[in-house]
Amino acid sequence: MRNILATAAAVALLGTALTLWADEEKISLDKLPKGVAEAVKKRFPKAEVQGAAKETENGKTEYEVTLKENGKTIDVIFNTDGVMTLIEKELAANDTPKAVKA
C-alpha cells in the first residue's frame, strides 16, 4: 500500500511539473515587449543576451531573459511592463555570504 501511494505521489508531481513546463515558450529577442527589452539594456548594459522565454502561470504572463556577464549566467524575470520581479545570479563558492557558508 505504501508503494502505491508513493508511486501515485510521484506521478502527480511529474504531471504538475510537465504542466508548468508546457507554459514556457522560447521566443526570439525581437518578440520581447519594448519595456522588457529596455529594462534589460538599462540594468545589464554589459551583459550578452543568451535567450528569452515567455511564461504564463495562473493567467499571468512573465518574460525570462537569460544573460551572460563576466562569464556568469544571470536569469531575470520581468512582468509585461518591464518591471524586474526576480533575478538569479550564478555565484562562485567564494562569493557566497558567510551566513550561507556556515
Image: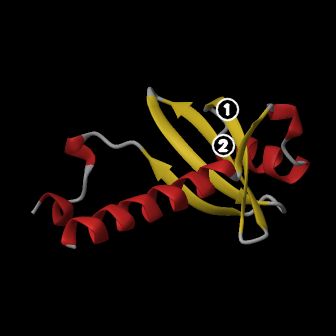
Q: Are marks 2 and 1 in contact (CB under 8 Å)?
A: yes
Q: Which residue is mark 1?
A: 51
Query: Residue drawn 66% across and 31% down?
Result: 49
Please state which amino acid type lies under the numbered disc 1: Gly
Tell whether 86 sits left or right of 10. right
The residue positioned 48% from the left and 51% from the top of the image is 88
Q: Looking at the image, is mark 2 or mark 1 earlier in the sequence? A: 1
Residue 37 occupies which quadrant of the picture? top right
Looking at the rendered structure, the kind of residue marked 2 is Val
Spot the residue most to the front: 1
The N terminus is located in which quarter? Answer: bottom left
Q: Is residue 8 left or right of residue 17?
A: left
In the rendered view, would you say 46 is above or below 55? Answer: above
* Residue, disc 2: 65
What is the secondary structure assignment of the residue under circle 2? strand
Q: How far, Cα to Cα, is label 2 from label 1?
A: 6 Å
Look at 60% across and 50% down and name the residue there.
Answer: 21
Considering only vertical position in the picture, is 58 above or below 77? below
